[in-house]
Amino acid sequence: MKIRLLFLRKNIFFTLFLAGIIFCLCSCATNRNKETVSYIWLTNNAKFILLPAHEIEKPLDGYQLMTASFSGQNYQMNTWVKADETGMDITLLNEMGANMGELIWRDGKISFSSSVFPPSMKPEYIIADFQFCFYKGQALSETLQKTGFYLTETESGRLVHRGNNIIMEITKGQNTITLNNHLRGYIYILEGEFE
């Protein structure tokens, strides 16, 4: 009886020990995956997971003038954008051409430093807005549909909507792209050679 009880205790201990190890390994693997997935909150309860860099429509390497309007304030900034299937580099420049900050996105890792934007500014939102303007419509559409949103391509640009509610409107001209986020209340106007 004692041997049987001792054997039973060892089995219970071994089972609990093994379960603990498996739990720890699964927790570590889960945390590792969470760290590499970048996303934004498209709405207060819907995530948009950033697309991989290879989903860009075509590479960009050149000057852009960015005008932003938010809460009645207007901002204008010169940028140099290099974006391709490996990632994105955005350099913020002042009127004299001096570097005022950089956003680098490679292999899912983001580096962002700027004296212009507040430290609370999340660079994932800049990357996401860039993707809505310059990434492949099909890839955007597939990702949006997972959260109940839809991308509609029009002759003049794109609409991101849920049902009849337009969340975001992207209008493309020859040398101008306008992104109007109706939900968050901001507008970007990008001027450059996009063709």
Image (tube, rainbow, N blue to C red):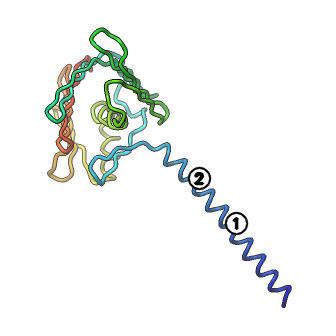
Up-down relation of residue 62 to residue 133 (above or below): above
Q: Quadrant of residue 64?
A: top left
Q: Estimate the x, y position of residue 190 in percent, counting from the top left.
A: 23, 24
Q: Are marks 2 and 1 in contact (CB under 8 Å)?
A: no
**How busy is the neighbourhood of tag 1: few (under 14 within 10 Å), some, or many (20 plus)?**
few
Amino acid type, mark 2: Cys
Residue pointed to by mark 2: 28
Q: Seen in the image, is 82 located left or right of residue 187? A: right
Image position, residue 79 (x, y; %): 31, 19
> Which corner quadrant holds the C terminus?
top left
The outermost residue toward the top is 96
Residue 19, position as x, y percentages in the image: 66, 67
Residue 106 location in percent, x, y?
A: 47, 30
Image quadrant of residue 50?
A: top left
What residue type is disc 1 on? Leu
Which residue is more in the foreground, 60 or 123? 123
Give the class, few, some or many, for how many residues have Cα within 10 Å of label 2's Cα (few <14, many ≥20): few
Q: Secondary structure at mark 1?
A: helix
Task: Kindly identify the residue that appears in the image at 16 percent across and 33 percent down.
Answer: 155
Specify which label sits upstream in the sequence, 2 or 1. Answer: 1
Label 2 SS: helix
Quadrant placement of the N terminus: bottom right
What residue is shown with label 1? 18
Q: Is residue 52 above or below residue 63?
A: below
Q: Is residue 13 left or right of residue 178?
A: right
Residue that sits furthest to the right in the current view: 3
Q: Is residue 116 above or below residue 126?
A: above
Residue at 31 percent across and 31 percent down: it is 130
Residue at (73, 73) in percent of width and height = 13
- Label 2 – label 1 distance at C-alpha: 16 Å
